[in-house]
Structure formats: C-alpha cells, structure tokens
Image (cartoon, rainbow, N blue to C red):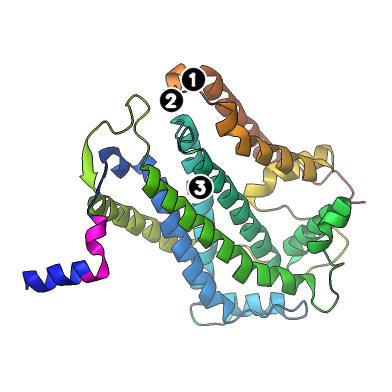
C-alpha cells in the first residue's frame, strides 16, 4: 500500500508540495491570501449555478433574479452564498493588502507581485460593479448610469466601455459577458501569476527577520491549516446565507437616484456628493498611488515600528475611508448627474 501511495504521489506531482515555507505562514495574518482564494472558489461555484437561471436581457433580468430568490428550489440559499462570499472576499482582500503594507512585503524583490495584487483588486472591484448591475433593480440601473456618465466624460477612451461601440447588444448584456467571462479569466490569470511569484520569491520573512531566517514547516502543513481556515470561512458564509437575505429591489425607474451603492463603494458615493468629477479622479489617484508604493518606498527597513511615516499614512488613510463610508451611509444624494 505504501508503494502504491508513493507511486501515486510521484505520478501526480504531490511530492512537489513537500517543500519548506516559513512557519509564520500558518498565522491567520499571513493566510489572508489563501482565505481569499477559498472565498473566490466559493464565489465562482455559486456564480456558475446562478448563471444557469439568469436571463441577461433588460426585460427579464430582474424577474429572473426574483425567480432565483423566490421560486427556484434553494435559489435563495445559493444567491445568499454568492452575496456573502463577495463580502468575505472584499474584507479579506483589504486586510491582506494592509498586512502586506504593514510588513513591507512589497519591497525588493516583490515589487512586481504587489503590482499584480493591485491589478487583482481593480479587476475584483470590476466584478462587484458588474454583479451589482446584473440585478437590474433600482440600485443596478443607478450604478449603470454612473458608469455611463464616466464613459461619456472619458470621450474616445470610454467608447469601449459605453454604448457607442455597438447597438446590437444592450449594456446589460455586455456587462453580463464581462462578469462571467472576461473579468473572471483575467482574475484567474492574475491569481496564477500572483501565486507563481510567491513560489519564486517565497513568502516574506517577518519584519524583524532577515530573508530566510526563522522556523520552517512543510508547505503541505500550511495547506492543512488553510483547509481549516477555509472550512471556517465556508461555515461563516453558510450561516450568513441562512440568516440574512441579500437585498433585491423591483424593476427600476430610470432617471432618478434614490439608492446607495454597496458599502465598498460608499466612500466614492460620499466624494461624488462633494464634487461629481471625484467619481473619476479619486479612483485614478488612489490606483496610481497603490501602483507606485514599492517604487516610492524603496528603503530596506521593513519593521513597522521604524517606518513611522508609512504607518501614519496608513492609519490616516484608513480613518479617511471609514469616515467617508460612514458619511455615505448617513447622507443622501446631493448632486445631479449632467
């Protein structure tokens, strides 16, 4: 039996998983990337099921979502899993990036992998936006109106993102295609590249250690721990899906703005209430800043207690975002889209 298991491991390449990684990779803070991966797998699986019953036409989209939520056997449960997986992925991604920033794991030789991570974040938020529109309720139509406003202001650059490219397919149909095909493909490619670079450079050491120092464990042991974390995440998503129903409105009334975006976009909603062009300027500035972080902060010091300026910037940024989200949650629309 041992020989059979050994031969099986050799032929399927399982033996390649028996390599050393830092022992601190088993801590939850260094496992946030793995937790995000598990949540994305749950997200994809539930999305594939939902896509079998969704009708991406303006006339039937909202009705098909209501059919899933109200009539289809366990449709409400699968939709709940999809919705809550989005929330978990969003939180874990943000915490993962904060951890990488605090430990300065974006520094040489991992600058490019940080860039890949930022691209992953942008693609993921693209998936959230397109998924919001697919409900085709009031919130969805208003989100699409914001998208078209941005496209119009971008001029020739925005033609690929708006209605000017073709009239044969509705914007809903085009965003649905993006949501289930192009964006997931890009996300998977970037994830594979992300993990490849982690394998090449290794998991970063603790901030107070030199590269390669510290206790080691086998990668298979890390996978077992990720499996436990993954089970915890799955149980959390299942529990939330059983107890809290995701929001869903009726068919929209065009030309009015009475809803608010999902919480992960409330900061932007708050800013656009101050000045409408922030809808374009703020994401562009923030994205550029994130991309440039490894090239601005090039020093070798990784200890957060010795990188006081970086930590102050981080804390202020977090407080600003929390403040904007809170402000967006308690205020109403104060602008007109022209």
Q: Residue at x 7, y 69 (%)?
A: 2
**1 and 2 marks in contact (CB < 8 Å):** yes
| Magenta stretch: dominant secondary structure | helix
Task: Indicate yes or no whether the magenta region holds residue 196.
Answer: no
Left or right position of 252 against 65: right
Precedes in sequence: disc 1 or disc 2? 2
Residue at the spot 58% in from the left edge and 31% down from the top edge? 295
Q: Are marks 3 and 1 in contact (CB under 8 Å)?
A: no
Q: Which mark is residue 302?
A: 2
**Residue 250, can we see it?**
no
Residue 290 appearing in the image = yes
Check residue 307 in the rendering and tell me which mark sits there, or answer none.
Answer: 1
Q: Above or below — where is 190 with respect to 316?
A: below
Q: Residues within 10 Å of mark 1 (few under 14, many from 20)?
A: some
> CA gap, disc 3 to disc 2?
21 Å
Q: Residue at x 77, y 76 (%)?
A: 58
> Mark 3 or 1 closer to N-term?
3
Disc 3/disc 1 C-alpha distance (Å)? 23 Å
Residue 116 or residue 83, whichever sits in front: 116
Q: Is residue 164 left or right of residue 218?
A: right
In screen coordinates, is 328 left or right of 160?
left
């Amino acid at each position: 039996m041992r020989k059979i298991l050994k031969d099986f491991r050799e032929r399927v390449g399982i033996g390649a998983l028996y390599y050393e990684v830092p022992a601190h990779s088993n801590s939850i803070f260094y496992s946030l990337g793995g937790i995000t991966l598990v949540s994305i797998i749950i997200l994809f699986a539930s999305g594939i099921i939902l896509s079998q019953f969704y009708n991406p036409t303006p006339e039937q989209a909202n009705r098909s979502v209501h059919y899933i939520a109200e009539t289809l056997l366990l449709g409400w449960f699968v939709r709940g899993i999809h919705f809550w997986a989005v929330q978990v992925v969003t939180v874990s991604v943000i915490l993962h990036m904060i951890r990488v920033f605090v430990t300065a794991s974006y520094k040489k030789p991992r600058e490019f992998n940080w860039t890949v991570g930022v691209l992953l974040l942008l693609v993921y938020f693209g998936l959230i936006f397109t998924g919001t529109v697919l409900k085709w309720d009031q919130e969805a139509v208003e989100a699409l109106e914001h998208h078209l406003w941005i496209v119009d202001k971008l001029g020739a650059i925005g033609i690929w993102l708006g209605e000017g490219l073709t009239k044969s397919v509705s914007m809903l149909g085009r965003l649905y295609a993006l949501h289930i095909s192009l964006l997931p493909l890009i996300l998977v490619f970037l994830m594979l590249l992300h993990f490849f670079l982690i394998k090449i450079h290794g998991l970063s050491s603790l901030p107070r250690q030199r590269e390669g120092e510290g206790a080691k464990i086998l990668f298979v042991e890390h996978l077992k721990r990720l499996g436990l974390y993954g089970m915890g995440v799955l149980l959390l998503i299942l529990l939330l899906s059983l107890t809290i129903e995701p929001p869903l409105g009726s068919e929209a009334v065009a030309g009015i703005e009475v809803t608010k975006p999902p919480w992960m976009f409330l900061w932007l909603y708050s800013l656009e209430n101050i000045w409408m062009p922030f809808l374009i300027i703020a994401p562009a500035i923030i994205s550029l800043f994130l991309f440039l972080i490894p090239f601005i902060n090039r020093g070798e010091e990784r200890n957060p207690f010795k990188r006081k300026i970086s930590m102050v910037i981080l804390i202020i940024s977090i407080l600003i975002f929390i403040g904007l989200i809170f402000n967006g949650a308690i205020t109403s629309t104060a602008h007109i889209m022209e």
